[in-house]
Image: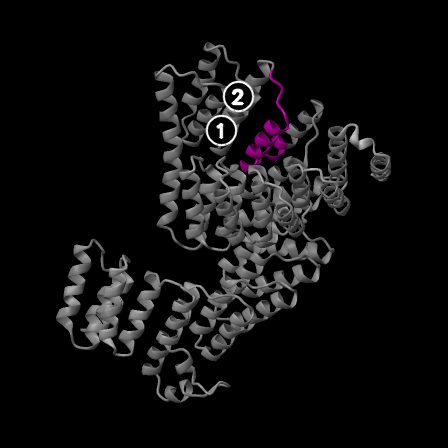
Amino acid sequence: MRERRVWVLKFQTCLSSWWREGLNAESPNSFVRALYALVKAYASLRMFDESIDVLFQTKRCSFGLSVLSCNYLMDHLVECGKVDMAVVAYKQFKMISVTPNVYTYGIVIKALCRKGDLEEAVGVFEEMEKAGVNVPLDGYACTAVIRGFVNEKKLQEAETVLLDMEEQGMVPDAFCYGAVINGYCNTGNMSKAPAFHDKMEKRASDAVDQFSRFKNKGIFLDEVAYNGVIDALCKLGRFEEAEKLLDEMKGKRMTPDIVHYTTLINGYCLHGRILDAMGLFDKMKEKGLKPDVITYNVLAGGFSRNGLLKEALHLLDHMKGQRLTPTTVTHNMIIEGLCIGGYAEEAEIFINSLENKSTENYAALVNGYCELGNTKGAFGLFVRLSKQGVLIKRKSPLKLLSNLCLEGEYEKALKLFEIVLALGDDTCKIMYSKLIASLCSAGDMKSARWVFDNLIWRGLAPDVVIYTVILNGYCRSNSLQEALNLFDDMKKRGISPDVITYTVMLDGHSKNIKRDRLSSGTRRNVRERNDTGLSIEEKMDPSVFLSEMIEEELTADVICYTVLIDSRCKSDNIDDAICLFTEMIDKGLEPDSVTYTALICGYCKQGHVEKAKDLVNKMWRKGIQPDSHTISAYIMES
């Protein structure tokens, strides 16, 4: 490495001499190419400051900057974890009139997703559209945004990106759909998860049908098309048809290659048909096709998921005999596969047998434990490793944190968080968001606030989502003064509340009215004055929040209107509630069962049982089925 650095520095010295002697004028194109080669050389050596300096020197010398060189530099910055530097470089390149291409946008979206700044990533999509860049982004960039939204539990936004992909003619793959399906499962929305799974399967089925239509029309389909439909058939479990396609290719003078066989082997492995996978593997070798590392990785993962550790180890020996070196990915597939299959002990035996263990191997073991549902084992391993000073990469701690929170193990989640901080990891904002949200859901506002304050202390700016989550926690725990203080702090920091934030505050006011009616002596509490001379009740008056929303040009959605209607009903202001109900319909918003339930309760409290009954009938006519809450409210209140 040191020798390479020396040679690169000598190369720059030669170029500088060339420039001073005016030789660049004789062959300007060659000089520019040499400069760009220098940029790439510095970037590959991770000498990023020098690489950027050469680029800007090129601009100062009146040479146009190559977007390809800028892309090369930005991509290396992202891969080396310097995402902030990559985003800054992108903005500076635009300022000096470098026109981004589709690859530039893909790189910066990847950087923003790793940074956790999903809103800005979506902004880049919009910027692309305005710039007239119509070439679709690669699936990776879109998948990164989808997964980022899912991690932050913004499933509606994830769905929107998925729909945008479809509208742009892109075909979301299993990773895109899988991310959204897992998101709905993890948030307990079991009704939507199967719908997305069905949609994914339908896409595979549609792909097979489309392939058949093209074939019947005599349209030539190449090897790539055949591989795509083989993959789709594997997803549908139609393996006999997939194998027939391999024979069909031969009849059309196309030779199935290693990619086609590996796709089919992977399908067999994922469906637990190991003998079929091995049979195809042997058949592939008989035909003179030499399996590559990817084929071996797929097969090793399949063996492991079925607890066949000896066979997996034998496969590794066979790899070495073929002069192929098992990679970290190979080892990780075995480790995770064993854990997913329920063979955690075998996974530990395997990892202990490795001569050169890496943090990625331990990360795979933690991931495997999490996939198996053995969160206790994953946490124990993480703690043991941390005591040895080993910190596995942030994706695994985040996965473990998610599992701990889902299982209600908040003390362990906090301990995990503290370990990550103590070992000096630059904890991503997603981890802060997830932990704050989980602690707020558990009602542990003291711990949630500690994590929030730690976020600010470390120089990370909480966004509107994090503020809204903790505000909701305060409102749910009836800590309205703390909610108001934080709401003011949010605005002082220049973070504008959105519709959801205002909805949370309005809901806090509504629930406070309910508590006030149920508890004696509460009037004294809500009338206590704060520093501004206003009571909490006065500061949380819905009209104040609505005025601010109008100033910010924010439009209330169905949930916001529902909260407002509920608030009016609870304060016995049924006329205002009816006006709001009519207003939302006039604006094209369709009330849902929760909205109807709020107004039905309001009618019943005022003794307007017939009006409540009419509203229930209206729900039926509109195809909105009253749920148990609606029916209970109607019976109890009437």
Q: Magenta region: which residues?
A: 289-312
Q: Is residue 122 above or below residue 530?
A: above
Q: Disc 2, disc 1: CB below 8 Å?
A: yes
Q: Residue drawn 41% across and 85% down?
A: 526
* Residue 504 on image: x %, y %: 41, 68
Mark 2: secondary structure = helix
Near mark 2 (Cα within 10 A), the count class, few <14, some 14-19 or many ≥20, is: some
The residue labelled by disc 2 is 280
Q: Main secondary structure of the magenta part?
A: helix
Left or right of 570, for residue 270: right
In the rendered image, which quarter is residue 25 located in?
A: top right
**What kind of residue is marked 1?**
Tyr
Given residues 185 and 203, the one toward you in this image is 203
The residue labelled by disc 1 is 268
In the rendered image, which quarter is residue 446 located in?
A: bottom right
Near mark 1 (Cα within 10 A), the count class, few <14, some 14-19 or many ≥20, is: many
The answer to whether residue 627 shows anywhere in this view is no
